Amino acid sequence: MSPTNRTVVVTGIGATTPLGGDAASTWEGLIAGRSGVRPLEQEWAADQAVRIAAQIAVEPGEVIPRPQARRLDRSAQFALIAAKEAWANAGFTDKAGEDPSVDPDRLGTVIASGIGGVTTLLDQYDVLKEKGVRRVSPHTVPMLMPNGPSANVGLAVGARAGVHTPVSACASGAEAIGYAIEMIRTGRADVVVAGGTEAAIHPLPIAAFGNMMAMSKNNDDPEGASRPYDVARDGFVLGEGAGVVVLESAEHAAKRGARVYAEAVGQGISADAHDIVQPEPEGRGIARALQNLLDNTDLDPAEIVHVNAHATSTPAGDVAELKALRKVFGDEADHFAVSATKSMTGHLLGGAGGVESVATVLALYHRLAPPTINVENLDPEAEAAADIVRGEARKLPVEGRIAALNDSFGFGGHNVVLAFRSV
Amino acid sequence: MAATQEEIVEGLAEIVNEIAGIPTEDVQLDKSFTDDLDVDSLSMVEVVVAAEERFDVKIPDDDVKNLKTVGDATNYILKNQA
């Protein structure tokens, strides 16, 4: 291939999620159909309308030394943990340059979140009001800036080819991975650490999302609250954590003998131009993103066997996505095993695209689609449009080349679709 | 009652330990905050604010740049504490 259309592969994965402190335990939780949603026990939660969330399984303070942790927003802590796992998982032994198999000038990072350092911003505002100007932390700005996680990961691995943060609400993590694929495809970098992170379990975001009527108020049944495609779905459950992949040009990966999980085939992006928060009900924008993916890559719809859906458990969004898949792929959509892993992880906002890309890559690698849990009464509209993997994990074809999609959409009308393929 | 030199060094050691994770016994009068104790310019602001509170002293920003070592800070606090 020409230097401007290079093949990109996934050589490392890392995650810290409500299901586990690393990618392996997260995957195990997904395959077992385990819910990470729990009641919020914090004092501030008592007078919230929403009192459930999918909180991180392993607190970052248990992993990151305290002097370092106190200078990092929680979202950057998650990103750093997931990125370090992915970096080691890719076989790198030190930061770029120290490990001679990767040149710092050819290494980038693209890590995104939906809301940035929101807990730092709000906590420091509390400090300002309660203790005065002098007590506001001098670390506040680098902690709250949305590019903080990407920059901190860049420092950790020694990335000099570029450090980026595309922000598109709940599509941010996927857009980051799409951006990273392009950096490698077009020759700007050989290796890019990419993904999404979010840490927004705080009274203000919960109150705000709650007042938008976007979140499930099923406080009495936390584990059953996130129920994409079920007729009784009543909104998403907020989750937190990060998912990160190491992307690499196929040539660079082959040269150093790296394990390849999957090919990162490419991306399709579009915008709805419909409403600031409501999804376009027929899924036209999503369909356009899917069509762009097909137009811009050599993805063969016949090879697609799995979709990690955006499906957040909202009444309108879940079905619009399935309609778009049907519209673009027609009968080919019959062989898509569609999984909504947010039924287990909750919705990690900007972290979702990262964690779900890790899940999608592992689904191809293990040829196993995670289940959608809590579907007791499948929405007839969903049933008519797609084959939903319900209850238990489902084996994917053991032979031949298979491909999978990971969809992410965000407030603002952002639609991002990523495609991965077995190697 | 004003703090003694020994109490000030002990207090600074606890503050530096909290902020930079350096063992308290390594925080000695001749040690440089930046070169020996992993206290960069932003963390130095934290050290100063914590010291102001602990020793009831005001350390204006213009004076902070002169506090290179633990000894500099200790002497400053000794001279200026209320």
Image: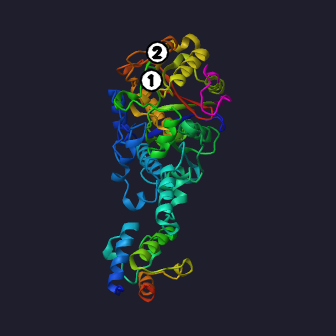
Indicate the amino acid at tag 2. Answer: Asp
In front: A87, or A218?
A: A218
Assign the magenta stretch its main secondary structure.
loop
Relative vertical location of residue A258 with respect to residue A314 in this rendering, above or below: below
Residues at marks 2 and 1 on the same chain: yes
Q: State the image coordinates of residue A255 (x, y, percent, origin top left).
A: 50, 41
Residue beneath label 1, please? A233
Specify the segment rendered in magenta.
A270-284
Q: Are marks 2 and 1 in contact (CB under 8 Å)?
A: yes
Residue A246 in view here: no
**What SS does tag 1 mark?**
loop
Residue A294 in view here: yes
Q: Residue furthest front?
A: A47
Give the chain of mark 2. A
> Which is nearer the N-term, disc 2 or disc 1?
1
Indicate the amino acid at tag 1. Answer: Arg
Q: State the image coordinates of residue A189 (x, y, percent, origin top left).
A: 59, 45
Q: State the image coordinates of residue A242 (x, y, percent, origin top left).
A: 45, 42
Give the chain of mark 1. A
Relative vertical location of residue A78 with respect to residue A409 in this rendering, above or below: below
Q: State the image coordinates of residue A170 (x, y, percent, origin top left).
A: 54, 36
Q: Residue at x 34, y 29 (%)?
A: A221
Q: Residue furthest right?
A: A273
In front: A64, or A323?
A: A323
Residue beneath label 2, please? A379
Q: Residue at x 31, y 76 (%)?
A: B25
Asked whether A64 falls inside the magenta stretch, the response is no
